[in-house]
Amino acid sequence: MSTEVFENLRLELRRGFLILAVMAQLQQEHYGYTLRKALADCGLAVDEGTLYPLLRRLETQGLLTSEWREENKRNKRFYRLSPEGETILRQLLEEWRGIDESLSRILRKENEHGTD
Amino acid sequence: MELIDRYLNAVRFWLPRAQEDDIIAELGEDLHSQIEERETALGRALNEDELAEILKQRGHPMSVAGRYLPQRYLIGPALYPAYMVVLRLVILWILLPILILIAAPIAIATAADPTLASIKALWDTAMGCVFALGVITLVFAIIERHPIRELENWDPRKLPKIPARPLKSLSDPKPVERAQAIVEMACSVVFAAFFLHFIWFRNSFELGDAHIVLAPIWRTVLWPMLLIGLSGLPVGWISLAFRANTRLRSGMRIAVDVVTLGVVGVLGTAGTLITFTVRHLPADQMAEATKWTDVGVRIAVAAIALGVLVDLVQEGVRYVRARRSA
């Protein structure tokens, strides 16, 4: 039961950060497979069933641009952060840092109370 | 690679036509990249079992395609609890008791072949429940897509005042719960559908081997009965839109109760309410069955009258208290 609760909360927590990670990674151009590998290499493994629909959603929202190009004799779709996406990424990162600092302060306070 | 093509084709089946080529091309590319990487690592081509394993990890074609579709639901989480309450109320507390305790025993008792009649009664019960489920789901799906504007444009200053003394009984001028109002509206629609289907357009129907004919008196109370049934819609709406105004709601309920008592009075003082004939039943048994059925209907009418009287008293007290507290 507690494993299931943890797993659900973990997925919920990851969902928001995944968008941030994908957008950050797409400051450089990638196609789906290399993007997945790049994220996995940074410790954020994501399955294709989650990644591709997310890429589509971000593109529909105008945060990514994409184009089909041939590479190694195969057609691949390359994604990159759009100018609007860059602005949103900056704002999101700022927000995330704010949340991170708040959480750190809360945890610090809790630790201080704990040692009192 | 035939397996891959079959897999992609199966995914394509569930995708929206406008996007299917694009999604399949990208999914195919991703699969080929993964396979190519595995083959490079192993130094040989993958066999069918290994390919099947990769596809299995990707997931069933329908669930893979489903991730590309927007999340859709017929009845959202906000309305779902009310939907379940209405379903339980209509199916478990109204429909099943009527079908199992009244309609099915009559059909089985009067049938030439009780086994066949039992199976038919069971089938009719199931179909009745499915019909009710369909109507209720449809009503809630419509409400889901056309949310009541009042629920969005609400004003906290119009919330009901807290009464000076604690609320103890139903007769206090306490606003009706939102779920109760929705239940009221849904029941009203279900009743109207049931009433129009079974009574409005005909005065006789078959139940097993029995041919049931409604007495002419029913034709004279059709309009009042339909209006009573549909009154749940405006009363429910008033409960939602003017939540604080318990006096308006109680006033309407009192009016509906008075009309209902009038209809019940007309039916109660009329002669025979229903007559029925059963093909194979001897005349003496037929007379006995008719007599007891009429008694049963009269008891039901009396029970309704009693229920309406209780409601009338409660709403009357609620109306007076609401008037005092205003």
Image (tube, coloured by chain):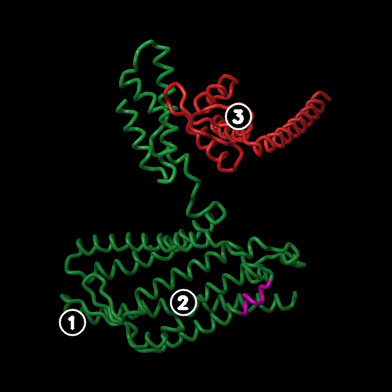
Chain colours: A red, B green
Query: Does residue B215 appear to the left or right of B173 in the view shown?
Result: left
Q: Is residue B268 visible?
A: no
Span of residues in magenta = B245-251
Q: Is residue B248 above or below residue B108?
A: below
Q: Chain of mark 1?
A: B
Q: Nearer the viewer, residue B209 or B238?
A: B238
The quarter of the picture where residue B281 lies is bottom left
The quarter of the picture where residue B123 lies is bottom left
Q: Label 1: which residue?
A: B283
Query: Does residue B204 appear to the left or right of B318 in the view shown?
Result: left
Q: In which quadrant of the rendered image does the N terminus of chain B lie?
A: top left
Amino acid on which disc 2 is placed: Ile
Amino acid on which disc 1 is placed: Ala
- Residue B117: image location, x then y, percent: 22, 64
Q: Label 3: which residue?
A: A26
Determine the CA span between mark 3 and mark 1. Answer: 88 Å
Mark 3 or mark 1, which is nearer to you?
3
Mark 2 or mark 3, which is nearer to you?
3
Q: Label 2: which residue?
A: B304
Q: Is residue A107 above or below residue B273?
A: above
Amino acid on which disc 3 is placed: Leu
Q: Chain of mark 3?
A: A
Q: Secondary structure at mark 3?
A: loop
